[in-house]
Amino acid sequence: MPEPADTPDAAPTAPAPPPAARVRATGLGHRFPGTDDLFTGLDFELVPGEVVAVCGPSGCGKSTLLSILAGWLAPARGTVEATGIGRTSWVFQNPYGVARRTALDHAVLPLLARGWRRADAERRAAEVLAEFRLAEAAHRPFRELSGGEAQRLMLARSVCTAPDLLLVDEPTAQLDRRTAATVNASLDAIGRAGTIVVIATHDPHTRAACTRVLDLGPPVPEPGDAA
Ligand SMILES: Nc1ncnc2c1ncn2[C@@H]1O[C@H](COP(=O)(O)OP(=O)(O)OP(=O)(O)O)[C@@H](O)[C@H]1O
Ligand SMILES: [Mg+2]
């Protein structure tokens, strides 16, 4: 009796790879009770490697869109379909940390939470701090960090959570131009390492450093613009 022909079905099957990370928004719109539509009809797809700026005037719904992408808020209209997004991390506009804990502690914690052994976690956290030019600050308590150092620490801590989707709200709003440039470079590096990065920003330099821009509203007229 002839052997059954080899078919793809008969081949030993390797475990299926995890689905590629992707976030797809379709017909997305939102308004809160008592507000007009903040945005309507947004269609976009985000894939790893992208660093996307969400721009528009104050109050147009940038932070609201981040909340929807994070899954914290249900959109009034449309859908967000997230595939292969295991971990989402959010970096708020105002850095927050534990005053007496060192910068290193802040970066170690998410690694311990992911099951790393302490020695390995400390080594990895120190590497990430160095990537964010925080090696010198590693053993300083959070309360002694400058605003720019604290902001970069929040990004470093996020990297230690190894997120698939990183949402960042106004990362450079309180920083001088030079510090802002280092934060923009760090965000770019996080994106190139394979995380989908979405940044709500008013900063034209951050916007220029992103691979794509989602504009939510008309530009605010500058003083002196023709009416
Ligand atoms: N929970 C809520 N209930 C009602 N209105 C809200 C709520 N959250 C936000 N809003 C309103 O929705 C609008 C958009 O807010 P959002 O914070 O998304 O704006 P933004 O574009 O991030 O502004 P900014 O640039 O100032 O940070 C604002 O008018 C705000 O007051
Ligand atoms: Mg906002």
Image: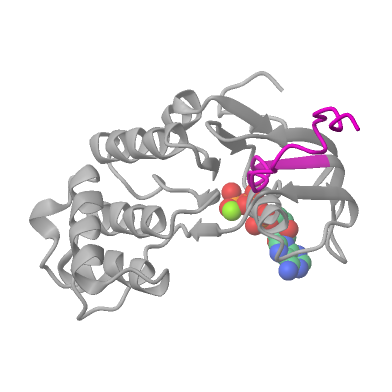
At x 27% / y 72%, what residue is drawn?
117
Of the pair 173 and 42, the residue shown nearer to us: 42
Mark yes or no: residue 221 visible. no
Q: Position of residue 71 (x, y in %)?
A: 71, 61
From this viewpoint, which residue is outermost toward the bottom?
Answer: 100
Of the pair 61 and 126, the residue shown nearer to us: 126
Judged left or right of residue 217, residue 63 is: left
- The image quadrant that residue 151 belongs to is bottom left
Q: Is residue 91 magenta?
A: no
Q: Position of residue 171 (x, y in %)?
A: 42, 48
Which range is magenta? 1-25
Q: Quadrant of the N terminus?
A: top right
Main secondary structure type of the part rendered in magenta: loop
Judged left or right of residue 198, residue 154 is: left
Judged left or right of residue 71, residue 103 is: left
Judged left or right of residue 204, residue 154 is: left
Q: Relative to 37, say whether 20 is above or below.
A: above
